[in-house]
Each structure stands twice: as structure tokens, then as C-alpha cells.
Amino acid sequence: MSIRQYWFVLWELTKRELKRKYARSFLGILWSCVYPLMRMALVVVLFSTIFNKGIDKYPAYYFVGFLMFEFFATATQTSLTTLKDNRNLLIKSKLPRELFVLSRVLTAFVNFLLGCIPFALVLACYRANVTVYYLMIPVVLILLLIFTTGVSYLVSIWFVFQRDARNIYSNFMFILRFFVAMFYSIDWMSDGVRWVIERNPLYVFIYVMRQCVVYGQRPEAVYIGRMFGWTIAMFLVGVLVFRKCENEVVERL
């Protein structure tokens, strides 16, 4: 049966993940709005004298990178253990195993959308002009969601076969954070480092979103092409690997 026939189950799994995430939080789901705003304020205070002079609308510039990177990092890191965490339900039910990964990704996406609320306030403070390029926002977000889903499929399988995957991936994400130009401009980097950053798929998504939302400009065609290319390639690879290994995964669980 197609996953489209399990939308209700997927939504229930996502609500379960959201409740679990905020069960012991005093602010509850409001924390998803407060936390990114606090992080932005901290970074701006600490780095404004270093970076602000060379980057226009620096708080909004940073906010875009932070929100998009945190969504990807949270979605993939929580998806890493999702098959093991739901071992009993996976074995006892006939639900598509992809649903459990998708529920973790959608949970992170809901948190991301909540984080966009204070980001909108930051844009309002800068009186950012709403241009025709705002129409690209849902396109970028859908592509990022699909790309992240593909990566999440891969890492969820990886963890079943390699239990050290959590530590390895956590360190990888820590390093990756510095290669998405979150709080600096790639114009300041050497040619070699800049070449690496420009081909980082996460940077591509962040750059396109910045151009459309923060600066109201049309992103270069090469970045749009890379964005679509990375999304299609990663999702197809993720789905193929997940479906090829899912039966062996159940045996290993």
C-alpha cells in the first residue's frame, strides 16, 4: 500500500513525537519560537563587531542559516535512531517503515516553521521589501524537506548496521556547521574553501533562501539547478537504500 494511504497514521506519529519533545518543557511548543530568537540575539551581540560591517542585514542573514541548518540537523539526528526506538511497533505492525522516519522529519519541520515566526519579526524590523521572489519560498522549503527526508532514510539505516553512527554523525554535523556560511560571508574565504562551501548542498538551500527573502534578489540559475539536483539525487538514493535494506533491518533489530 502507498504511504499516501497512511496520512492519518503519519500525523498521529508526528503528534506523538511533538508531545514527547515538549513533555518536560516549561514553555512547551513556544520554545521553538523563543530559542532561535535567543540564539540570534546572542550571535549578533557577540559577532556584530566582527561580521556585521561586511554583511548587510546581518541578524536576518544569520537567522536564515541557523533555522535551515537546525532543521536539517535535528531531523537527521533524530531520524538516526528512529528504527531502533520504534523496534516493538515495527515488528508487531505492518505499517510502512518509512512512516517512522517521516514522523521525525515532520516534527523537526513543524519546529522550523514555528522558528520562522520570530524570523518574520526580524524582517519586519528591517522593513524588508516583499518581492516576487518570495514566491520561491515554498519551493525551497519543499525541496529542503525532500532532501532532508532522503538523508534521514540513509542515516536511519546506517545506525542499525553501525551503532557508532550516532557519535560519528554528531561530530560530522558539528564540523558541517562551519561549512554553510551561517555567520560569515564566503567572500572572505580562500578560493579552495569557497569552492567546497559552494558545493555543500545545505549552503545552496541557505543561499537561495537568503537571496529571495533577505535581499529580495533572484538567485543565480546555477544555485537553483544545484538545489534541484541535490534534492532529486539524495531522495532517490535514500529511498532505494531504505527499501533495499528494510527487511534486513527488521532482522537486525
Image (cartoon, rainbow, N blue to C red):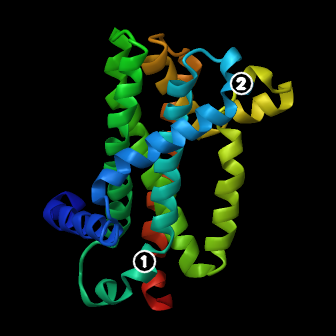
Please give the residue where the numbered disc 1 appears in the rendered image: 83
- Quadrant (top left, top right, bottom left, bottom right) of the N terminus: bottom left
Where in the figure is residue 9, as x and y percent of width and height?
A: 17, 68
Amino acid found under the numbered disc labelled 1: Leu
Q: Quadrant of residue 149?
A: bottom left
Please give the residue where the numbered disc 2 appears in the rendered image: 49
Where in the figure is residue 83, as x and y percent of width and height?
A: 42, 77
**Which residue occupies 32% across, 30% down?**
138
Residue nearer the viewer, 144 or 45: 45
Horizontally, residue 81 falls left or right of residue 97, namely right
**Which residue occupies 69% across, 68% down?**
168
Up-down relation of residue 195 to residue 132 (above or below): below
Where in the figure is residue 194, as x and y percent of width and height?
A: 77, 28
Up-down relation of residue 67 to residue 129 (above or below): below
Residue 209 seen in this snapshot: yes
**Which residue occupies 36% across, 81% down?**
86
Marks 1 & 2, CB-CB < 8 Å contact: no
